[in-house]
Image (cartoon, helix red, strand yellow):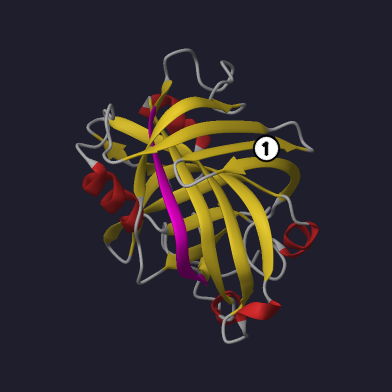
Amino acid sequence: MDDATTAPGRPSTDPTVRARRLAVQLSAEVERRLLLSWRADPDVVAPLLPAPFRPQLVDGAAVVGVCLIRLGSVRPRGLPAAVGLRAENAAHRMAVTWDEDGEERSGVWIPQRHTGSRLVALAGGRLFPGTHGRARFDVEESEDRVRVAMDAFDGTSLAADVEVVPELHGSALFADLAAASAFFEAGSTGWSATGGTSHDGMHLGTDAWNVDACRPLDVRSSLYDDPAVFPPGSAVLDDALLMRRVPVTWTALPSLMPT
């Protein structure tokens, strides 16, 4: 994407790239964000990650997952909420670490993004980082139950049916809801491919971070259920978290170069 030479895992220092990425800042409301996590075999996940990323481990397990999010009032920061758009989106995510400025950082690598909005699909990768494929969404939700199904035009599919519960139970990754919440809050930087050798990043910021625990009733993913990618037993559904009615800001980051 550019000819800048950088140290492994460090952001590009090309001033044009830096200015273009940092100029993008979006405000929105997370109307609903359902985070589903699988504990996975690190040896299976590692080959799926581009440099400089490596699997982030929790008690020896990699963490992969899905984010099913409905955003409202999405607009460039500083504009009134009334001019913003509303969209259902989905992202497959893999928790990762990388080295930057001599320190280990954490976030997520996003191999797939999908949206129900034609405008988001057109703007993604152009006006803001992250290419989005088109998909159809079917949603039913109440205060104590959420059902979301996605069928993408490229054949990717997702389905989740969860029940909101007071505490997190049955997770092998996290001891309780507070531990799960802290893990995902600390990994609020997402990276996705540009089509070249660099990676585009967005950081999610909010002063109102809050999640509820959910009990998964029925969850399916065409990626994590694919035995050709994840052999049987190498990715096991672990937990589900729900965020609702949270104001957020996304800030574009300088492109990350693998070498």
Label 1 SS:
strand
Q: Is residue 93 visible?
A: yes
Q: Is residue 96 magenta?
A: no
Query: At 73% from the left edge and 47% from the top edge, which residue is drawn?
Result: 133
> At 70% from the left edge and 52% from the top edge, which residue is drawn?
132
Would you say residue 245 sits in the magenta stretch? yes
Query: Which stretch did the figure color magenta?
Result: 238-251
The answer to whether residue 256 is visible is no
Q: Position of residue 142 (x, y in %)?
A: 52, 45
Q: Relative to 54, is 249 above or below?
A: below
Q: Which residue is drawn at the image coordinates 47% and 69% (left, top)? A: 248
Residue at image mark 1: 150
Q: Is residue 197 above or below residue 61?
A: below
Is 134 on the left or on the right of 30, as rendered?
right
Task: Say whether residue 7 is left or right of residue 152.
Answer: left
Q: Residue furthest left?
A: 175
Where residue 1 sits: x, y (%)? 66, 63
Image coordinates for residue 127, horizontal then vertical, percent:
70, 71
For residue 241, what is the image quadrant? top left
Kind of residue at disc 1: Met
Residue found 36% across the figure and 54% down from its top: 187
Res 130 quadrant in image: bottom right
